[in-house]
Image (spheres, rainbow, N blue to C red):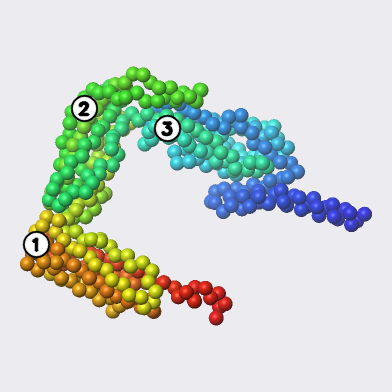
């Protein structure tokens, strides 16, 4: 009898562990996160967090006001429901519930606040709830919305593309406001020496109808009439004479008379190309066995066809002695292009082989040209397959 009882207890304990192990693992993961309280799932008295509605569609909303929805739930299980944590995705705030434990049959609420600022178009957000629900310890609630910006600017990033040295380039920004009194009143550049701005007048305009989502039915309805708006166009010119290279972290701040959107920042970018081009721009040697030889050729030429001089070449590298190079003009009588020839051997004692060439030229604003190279030693076939530890 004692043996049967002991076996029965052992079997029940084993079933309990098998049932609860996933929950324990989840609880341990939750406990590793700051501010989250682990919950224990009782297989004898499981909790059951039941939501009559798990998705809410706010419909068409403006981007200048937060919206809120309350998801109601009920503990339909046999044990106490415990809420360990609630977390919203990027634009959702989920205030901590007023209480975290709910008796069987007790109801509660999860309040979700959605901030549409900076959003446009269809939005999908998720709220994650961690509980001791026996069947679904991680519950996902969803909210949707069609966000209509009151003020918008396109494009959001002003990219001039690749611009040749000493050339200009121009882009146009379009600012639209839905307020009938909307005006663009000014701008501010982070680098006035780099750009020139022409601010147009704000005028009455129209935009094509957009699909609108109905919150109650969750369906999409196509508007049939164009929407009246106020529009302003801003032309931005990249001035000539700038340094060669990537132009970034420059901005224009557009100022408006809209109280909730008094300013909008647009990043300005460009790739200012020089007259001297290296082909390739970077050398990848790949994987080379120890003692393996490599050969590479690089062409440095003037895009405009103007002769230029390379005054000096500096070579710095890991295992520099393993690399030899020569440098000659393609046509000594018309030095508009040069050849850099690189030969080397992968050292047996080196794991990687990397370095760079610095070319000094007489070209204005292109006095220094950089050529990087990189390669790695291929592992010996015997050492890569030998796992005996010898």
Picture coordinates of residue 4, whole percent (x, y): 89, 54
Which residue is at 11% across, 66% downward?
Answer: 331
Residue 351 place in picture, x, y as percent:
39, 73
Query: Looking at the figure, which quarter contains the C terminus?
Result: bottom right
Q: Position of residue 342 (x, y in %)?
A: 25, 72
Q: Which residue was labeled with disc 2?
A: 202
Per the rendering, the mark at residue 122 is: 3
Dot 1: within a 10 Å radius of its alpha carbon, few (fewer than 14), some, or many (20 or more) residues?
Answer: some
Do tag 3 and tag 2 residues touch (Cβ < 8 Å)? Answer: no
Q: Which residue is mark 1?
A: 307
Q: Is residue 268 above or below residue 10?
A: above
Image position of 86 (left or right of 251): right
* Residue 102 visible here: no
Does residue 250 appear left or right of residue 149 in this picture?
Answer: left
Q: Is residue 78 above or below residue 335?
A: above
Residue 220 occupies quadrant: top left
Q: CA distance from mark 1 to mark 3?
A: 56 Å
Tell me the distance, in whole angstroms, between the alpha carbons under discs 3 and 2: 28 Å
Asked which quadrant contains residue 158, the reply is top left
* Point 67% across, 32% down: residue: 106
Residue 272 versus residue 100 in the image, above or below = below
Q: Secondary structure at mark 2?
A: loop
Q: Residues within 10 Å of mark 2 (few under 14, many from 20)?
A: some
Looking at marks 2 and 1 on the same chain, the residue that comes earlier in the sequence is marked by: 2
Judge depth for marks 1 and 3 and give the one in front: 1
Question: Which one is in front in this view, the residue at disc 3 or the one at disc 2?
Answer: 3
The residue positioned 31% from the left and 21% from the top of the image is 226
Horizontal arrangement in the rendering, residue 255 relative to residue 330 (left or right): right
Locate residue 75, reporting x and y percent. 67, 34
Earlier along the polypeptide chain: callout 1 or callout 3?
3
How many marks overall? Answer: 3
Front tag of 2 and 1: 1
């Amino acid at each position: 009898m004692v043996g049967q009882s002991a076996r029965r207890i052992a079997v029940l304990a084993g079933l309990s562990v098998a049932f609860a192990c996933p929950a324990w693992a989840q609880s341990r993961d939750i406990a590793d996160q700051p501010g989250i309280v682990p919950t224990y799932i009782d297989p004898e008295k499981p909790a059951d967090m039941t939501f009559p509605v798990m998705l809410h569609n706010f419909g068409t909303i403006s981007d200048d006001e937060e919206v809120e929805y309350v998801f109601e739930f009920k503990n339909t299980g046999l044990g106490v429901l415990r809420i360990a944590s609630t977390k919203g995705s990027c634009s959702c705030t989920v205030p901590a519930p007023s209480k975290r434990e709910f008796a069987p049959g007790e109801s509660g609420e999860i309040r979700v606040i959605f901030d549409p600022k900076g959003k446009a178009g269809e939005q999908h957000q998720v709220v994650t709830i961690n509980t001791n629900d026996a069947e679904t310890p991680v519950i996902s609630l969803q909210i949707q919305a069609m966000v209509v910006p009151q003020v918008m600017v396109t494009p959001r990033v002003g990219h001039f593309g690749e611009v040749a040295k000493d050339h200009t380039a121009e882009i146009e920004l379009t600012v639209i406001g839905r307020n009938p009194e909307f005006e663009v009143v000014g701008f501010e550049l982070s680098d006035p020496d780099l750009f020139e701005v022409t601010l147009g007048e704000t005028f009455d305009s129209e935009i094509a109808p957009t699909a609108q989502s109905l919150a109650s039915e969750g369906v999409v309805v196509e508007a049939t009439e164009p929407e009246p708006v106020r529009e302003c166009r801003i032309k931005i010119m990249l001035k000539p004479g700038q340094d060669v290279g990537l132009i970034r972290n420059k901005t224009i701040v557009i100022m408006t008379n809209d109280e909730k959107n008094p300013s909008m920042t647009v990043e300005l970018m460009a790739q200012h190309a020089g007259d001297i081009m290296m082909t390739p721009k970077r050398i990848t040697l790949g994987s080379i066995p120890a003692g393996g030889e490599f050969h590479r050729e690089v062409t440095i030429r003037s895009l405009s066809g103007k002769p230029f001089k390379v005054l000096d070449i500096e070579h710095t590298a890991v295992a520099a002695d393993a690399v030899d190079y020569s440098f000659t003009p393609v046509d000594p009588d018309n030095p508009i292009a040069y050849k850099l020839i690189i030969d080397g051997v992968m050292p047996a004692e080196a794991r990687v082989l990397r370095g760079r060439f610095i070319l000094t030229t007489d070209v204005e604003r292109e006095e220094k040209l950089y050529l990087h190279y990189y390669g790695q030693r291929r592992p010996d076939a015997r050492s890569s397959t030998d796992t005996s530890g010898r």
